[in-house]
Amino acid sequence: MLSSQGTVPRIAVESLTGCAGELLVILENLDKLLPYVRVVSFPFAQSQNDSGAVDITFLEGSVSNPHDLEKLKRIRAKSRWLVAVGNCAVWGCVQKSACSHCKVEDMLKAVYGQDSKIEVLPSTSLDEHVKVDVKLSGCPINATQFLSVTANLLQDHLPYITHKPVCLECKLKENPCVLIEDNLPCLGPVTAAGCGALCPSVGAACYGCWGPSQDAQMDAMAVILQEKGYAIDEVLNRLQSFGAPAKLFERMKFEVKNERV
Amino acid sequence: MLKPVVLPKNAFKLFFQSLKGLGTVYAPVKVSEKSYSFKEVHSPEEIAFEALRTILPPKKFFYPQEETLIRYKNGDFEEVQPEKKFQVIFGVHPCDLASLGILDTIFSSEPADSHYLKRREQSLLVGLSCMPDKHCFCNAMNADTAGSAYDLFLTDTGEEYFIEIRSAKGVELIKSLAEKVSDANPENHEAYKEFWKKREAAFSHGLETENLRSLLDLEWENQIWDEMGKRCLSCGNCTPVCPTCYCFDLVDIAGLNAKEGERVRQWDSCQFVGFAQVNGDFNFRATPADRLKFWYRHKLHGFDDAYGFKTCVGCGRCTESCPAGIDDIVQVVKILQGKKENKHYEP
Ligand code: SF4
Ligand code: SF4
Ligand code: SF4
Ligand code: SF4
């Protein structure tokens, strides 16, 4: 077992700015973990929490204010393995993409009033500040992946998480393609799998909540969606909603043609 | 092999009942406005006889999308065997039968894939004739007749089915229907030939494949690959839908107690960037253009030198399933041959 003290591994489940979706998934699966770990801190679920060193911290949420940043640094310092869980922690999610559209101060005033004293920072993912050992995206995370990541870390192995696209899961389920058949703006080709192609399985377009797939072809996706009649602003908005980093859009340069085979 | 027989269509219900008597029957079913899928059926009414191509090909019955190969516990491991269950796949068209012939060769080459072969053994394949649409080009790929990977093959001659019998399993089934079927007479043979003539005339692709071997080698540096690569989403849809694509990924899923776990295989795609990525972050096929070109070559010229066949059977599934419209093998080959102007793929 992993614990450096030769005792039961100590884990912590913490959050920054997020919706608690990952915390709920972890809570739901906690009984499976309990025989193998000691949960020393999980403020969302228990009242007795210890701030000492831990073997693994699962951390949800993005860094969206100075308090988050301090907390993140504290957590990093006390954790052997830091696992970013959920799109917010891994990519920054909707709050990060909102910050790329407007100034965070303007949002603060619009929501909390002109003279709000709340301190804010433009939202960022964890790895923009500290070293993150494992990134497990999701919105919320997939329980099977979470358990498998934990099982690997308990053995001191870094887990293998693929970032193949949602289309793979969609095709393995043999769904009709909503992008082709219904011309819906499905982002399955550029979104990381893990959800089991939830949205296309019920006839809806994937809106990318899991974050980008490995080497997501944003430029080609934009071309295809434009050919289907979606305006470029709308397309970019959609592609950027869930915190996809700016560098994925650098290649977007060639013009759109309407002619198809 | 028994002589062909004919089954009047009004006796199809009985034929279907005999199939059901053997095991679970799967047949094409309509799943959306434009799509079909092989699914379990309980009565002939559920079958979409008009279906040309299903989203996934019948390979899924022998080589499932995902399966556990090994379970391990306390240092021991157990090989998981395919479920013992007899399956009947009804309504398999010539291209898909040809694809199963190809997969049989590939999966039975040493080291043979026992899971695939076991499932092939415990199944009965019933072929069905079809009328090609604009994306079908099986006849250009030598895959337009029933081949050998079937037990029974039904040709729709109007009022009846002309049934070719290929295997002992097929003979058994036809014997059980002796009351309903009759030996094909000269008139039936005429109707059969008539059907296949009409079908041959219905192909509209205009594809000529004589020079494919050299073409794919000579045009390796053609700019069309880069042009199409720019449109490619790397979504990988072209490979699960292809009846002869067989690549998979293996993943070990460890249990929390460190004492047990399982090894799972799942279909993979050469169109994913991670597919040819190796240690040291080196990638043999780093760009979508590299991967797409590789795939085209693999389908059209990857096996002919070693095995004497091409692994594309001309089913048209990739063409229909590519969101970017770049898996149009017929058009791309024509452009490479200089028979068609490349005005579609320019950036
Ligand atoms: S519906 Fe969406 S996720 Fe599914 S295959 Fe089509 S593009 Fe991919
Ligand atoms: S299909 Fe897309 S939007 Fe829907 S749950 Fe999955 S990743 Fe999220
Ligand atoms: S390459 Fe395309 S047309 Fe050829 S067999 Fe595969 S899916 Fe069918
Ligand atoms: S060729 Fe088409 S189906 Fe294949 S990966 Fe590229 S976009 Fe997807």
Image (tube, coloured by chain):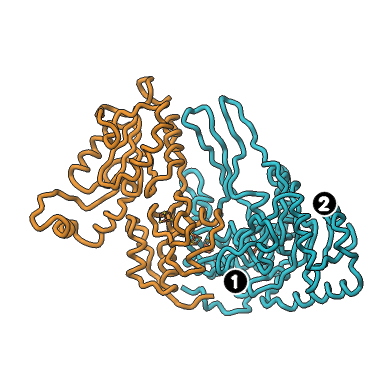
Chain colours: A orange, B cyan
In which chain is the residue bearing label 2? Answer: B
User: Which tag is nearer the camera, tag 2 or tag 1?
Assistant: 2
The type of residue carrying mark 1 is Val
The residue beneath circle 1 is B332
Find residue B261 and report its image quarter.
top right
Q: Residue furthest top?
A: A6
Q: Mark 2 near ligand 3 (CB under 8 Å)?
A: no
Which residue lies at the image location 30% right of the left edge and 28% below the top edge? A40
Marks 2 and 1 on same chain? yes
- Counting from the top left corner in percent of width and height, residue A121 is at 19, 50
Please determine whether, in this image, residue B80 is positioned above or below residue B301.
Answer: above
The residue beneath circle 2 is B169
Which residue lies at the image location 57% right of the left edge and 61% below the top edge? B238
The type of residue carrying mark 2 is Lys
Give B52 or A193, whichever is nearer the viewer: B52
Give B275 or B64, whichever is nearer the viewer: B64
Mark 1, Cα crowd under 10 Å, few <14 / some 14-19 / many 20+, is: many
- Counting from the top left corner in percent of width and height, residue A237 is at 32, 64
Q: Earlier in the sequence, mark 2 or mark 1?
A: 2
Find residue B101 and report its image quarter.
bottom right
- Counting from the top left corner in percent of width and height, residue B180 is at 85, 62
- Counting from the top left corner in percent of width and height, residue B271 is at 53, 57
Please determine whether, in this image, residue A74 is positioned above or below residue B166.
Answer: above
Left or right: where A260 falls relative to A106: right
Mark 2, Cα crowd under 10 Å, few <14 / some 14-19 / many 20+, is: some
Q: Are marks 2 and 1 in contact (CB under 8 Å)?
A: no
Which residue lies at the image location 37% right of the left edge and 20% below the top edge? A7
Find residue B80 and report its image quarter.
top right
Dot 2 lies on which element?
A: helix
Q: CA distance from mark 2 to mark 1?
A: 41 Å
